[in-house]
Image: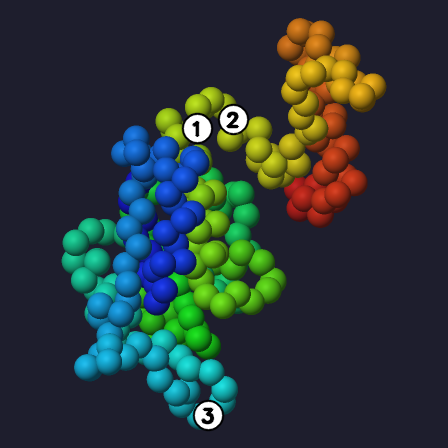
Amino acid sequence: MRIDIISVIPGLLEGPFSHSIMKRARDKGLLEVHVHDLRQWGLGKHKQLDDYQFGGGAGMVMMCEPLANCIEEFKDQREYDEIIFMTPDGKRYDQKMANRLSLFNNLLIICGHYKGIDERIREHFVTMEISVGDYVLSGGELGAAIVVDSIGRLIPGVLGDETSALFDSFQDDLLAPPVYTRPSDFRGWKVPEILLSGHTKKIEEWRYEKSMERTQNRRPDLLQEDE
């Protein structure tokens, strides 16, 4: 999979993809992440990227021309399955979206800044708009990092255990069950006996019950969505 990211401040994305699981995915050649500085397509001597809003109002807007030129150059090189804009008014990101996006080959992500991007870019280029939550960030970079991380770990071969991602929270609309490791008795706080029994079927049943219980207590809305 290849993911291209357009950013005004590409330095914000140097860390998230250089460590841990994302680094492993890139080292294995399973995931390519290319962060592009939009300033390369800026206008004039000062590489201008933004301008005042028509109609007045506080905040600058990212201009059409630099973004359009950048996107068109990339589209000439490859076909994108989705061109994504990170924006607070996009569709709320969830595990189902991550699962779907992980099946694609090429994604292009636009990180907004300032007051946002000129609406004409959204109308003529963007095919998908994503929000990572009901709050506003200084730019789309952190949201893009969340999206890439959640997608990358689903690519076959990235995780050490191929089945690990199948039991994450939000898969099957349930939160993950409690997990434990050694020692089995720490300060008198003991691991549930069932997990030490070696009885696979009973352990799976216990985990399902705990997932259901945790979801009902903490995120009952997930269960209501299935009804």
The vertical placement of 112 against 33, above or below, is below
Q: Secondary structure at mark 2?
A: helix
Structural distance between the alpha carbons of marks 2 and 3: 51 Å
| 171 left or right, relative to 139 | right
Q: Residue at x 37, y 27 (%)?
A: 157
Residue that carries the numbered disc 3 in the rendered image = 56
Q: Secondary structure at mark 1?
A: loop
Residue that carries the numbered disc 2 in the rendered image = 164
Question: Measured from the top left, where is residue 86 in percent x and y?
Answer: 44, 61
Image quadrant of residue 25?
Answer: top left
The vertical placement of 131 against 194, above or below, is below
On the question of residue 113 being in view, the answer is yes
Viewport quadrant of the N terminus: top left
Amino acid identity at mark 1: Leu
Residue density around tag 3, few if under 14, some if 14–19, many if 20 or more, within 10 Å? few
Amino acid identity at mark 2: Ser
38 vs 14, nearest the viewer: 14
Question: Measured from the top left, where is residue 5 in percent x and y?
Answer: 33, 56
Structural distance between the alpha carbons of marks 1 and 3: 50 Å
